[in-house]
Each structure stands twice: as structure tokens, then as C-alpha cells.
Image (cartoon, rainbow, N blue to C red):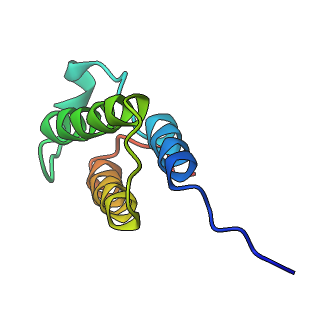
């Protein structure tokens, strides 16, 4: 039996899709900045959206991410998700 290595481009696209589904990018700014805050949710979401858009563009241009780049996006997304969760902005999945 031979095991095929995962395609890094597909892995990055799937990760981006999962992050876009899990994060409240469409939440109105008034909801993001109300109540107790453990980090600026708006700035974190803007940063993450920019990172994802950058990778979407790079993938369209044919760039193949390395495993470290995939891992970095995953790690950043998890950290931002935890902050948003502490701020009460995401539903636990």
C-alpha cells in the first residue's frame, strides 16, 4: 500500500474555507466592540481576513504553500478564535 502525500494547495484551500466558516467575519462592528474585551476583536478579524485574502490570491496565482505556512495560518486562526471565544463572539462548535 502506498500512501499519497496530501496536496498542500488543497490543504490550504480547505483550511481557509474552515476558518471562513468558523470566524464571525460578517458580524457588525457594533457587536464586535460591545461588553468585556480581551483583545480587539475587530483588529484581529481584519488581520486574519487580510492573511486569508493574501493566500487566496497567492493560490490563484499558482503558488504552492509549504507545510510551515499552512501551520502558521492554522495556529494564528486558533489563537484568534480563542480570543473571540473569550469575548463571547463565537459559538463553540
Q: Quadrant of residue 43?
A: top left
**Residue pushed farthest bottom?**
1
Q: Residue at x 57, y 46 (%)?
A: 10
**Could you tell me which residue is drawn at 38 percent across and 53 percent down?**
65
Among all residues in the image, which is located at the extreme right?
1
Which residue is at the front of the view, 33 or 64? Answer: 64
Q: Residue at x 52, y 38 (%)?
A: 17
Q: Is residue 54 above or below residue 72?
A: above
Residue 44 in percent (x, y) is at 18, 42
Q: Quadrant of residue 29?
A: top left
Q: Quadrant of the N terminus?
A: bottom right
Q: Position of residue 11 (x, y in %)?
A: 54, 52
Residue 38 screen position, x and y as percent: 15, 53
Q: Is residue 1 left or right of residue 64?
A: right
Q: Closest to the observer: 41 or 67?
A: 67
Q: Is residue 43 visible?
A: yes
Is residue 34 visible in the rendered image? The answer is no
On screen, 23 above or below 77?
A: above
Task: Answer with left or right where residue 29 lies relative to residue 70.
Answer: left
Where residue 59 appears, x then y in whole percent? Answer: 41, 36
Apparent side of residue 3 relative to residue 10 in the rendered image (left or right): right
Amino acid at each position: 500500500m502506498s500512501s499519497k502525500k496530501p496536496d498542500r494547495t488543497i490543504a490550504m484551500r480547505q483550511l481557509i474555507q474552515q476558518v471562513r466558516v468558523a470566524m464571525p467575519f460578517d458580524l457588525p462592528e457594533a457587536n464586535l466592540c460591545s461588553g468585556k474585551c480581551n483583545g480587539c476583536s475587530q483588529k484581529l478579524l481584519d488581520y486574519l481576513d487580510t492573511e486569508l485574502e493574501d493566500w487566496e490570491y497567492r493560490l490563484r496565482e499558482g503558488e504552492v504553500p509549504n507545510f510551515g505556512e499552512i501551520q502558521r495560518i492554522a495556529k494564528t486562526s486558533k489563537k484568534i478564535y480563542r480570543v473571540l471565544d473569550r469575548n463571547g463572539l463565537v459559538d463553540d462548535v
